[in-house]
Image: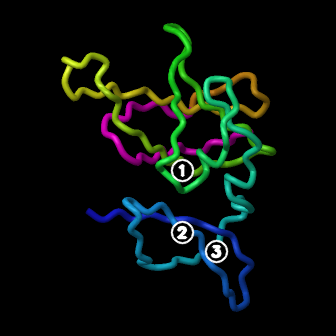
Amino acid sequence: MQELVWTEIFLAGGAHVDTVLPRPYAKLGYYRDAYVLAYPSLAVEGSLMRDRLRRVLANGKEVDKDIITGIDLDRKVRIEPAGDKDPASLLLEFEALFEARAISLWRHAEMPKDLYDGPRDYPPVFRLESSEDDIPFNLCVRCIVLRCGRWMLRPRKVLMS
């Protein structure tokens, strides 16, 4: 089965460009270029998310932000509730306001909680919230991801700081 993957970079236009593009994620080590698409960016797209991300917290503990922004899907971070009443959290802290037009999620299937339970999966509920000053957070999107793999959340407009 083939999968279309991508990376992105910003370049100054109006002249001949000679650059090496970053290699996208390669499932089982196989990758082949399909095409390169270049288009003018919008005024709000002055930089990539990974360039404006200050730090990443998973359940209150700082993790390597390259796990979140990188292209290696084999590197993982486990996000799970600390207790029965506390939800699991992934906090992306940006240097300045950042407008997200789409967010991709990659989820792996969970192992059964009981060996005799069979190959069930317990899909998490994702809540995307944003805040300009860390208090209060406003709900943007809520969804349940039933299947494993890559999913894209397309909020109407999300500003994160």
Identify which residue, 101 or 113, lies in the foreground. Answer: 113
Cβ–Cβ under 8 Å for marks 3 and 2: no
Tell me if residue 139 comes above or below residue 97 in the rendering: above
Span highlighted in magenta in the image: 140-161
Identify which residue, 118 or 7, lies in the foreground. Answer: 118
Which quarter of the figure is the N terminus placed in? bottom left
Q: Disc 1 marks which residue?
A: 102
Q: Is residue 90 left or right of residue 146?
A: right
Tell me if residue 43 comes above or below residue 107 in the rendering: below
Q: CA distance from mark 1 to mark 3?
A: 18 Å
Residue type pointed to by label 2:
Arg
Q: Disc 2 marks which residue?
A: 23
Position of residue 19 measured from the top left corner of the image (x, y, whole percent): 66, 82
Position of residue 23 measured from the top left corner of the image (x, y, whole percent): 54, 69
In reply to whether residue 152 is colored magenta, the answer given is yes
Residue 40 is labelled as: 3
Q: Is residue 146 left or right of residue 89?
A: left
Mark 2 secondary-structure assignment: loop
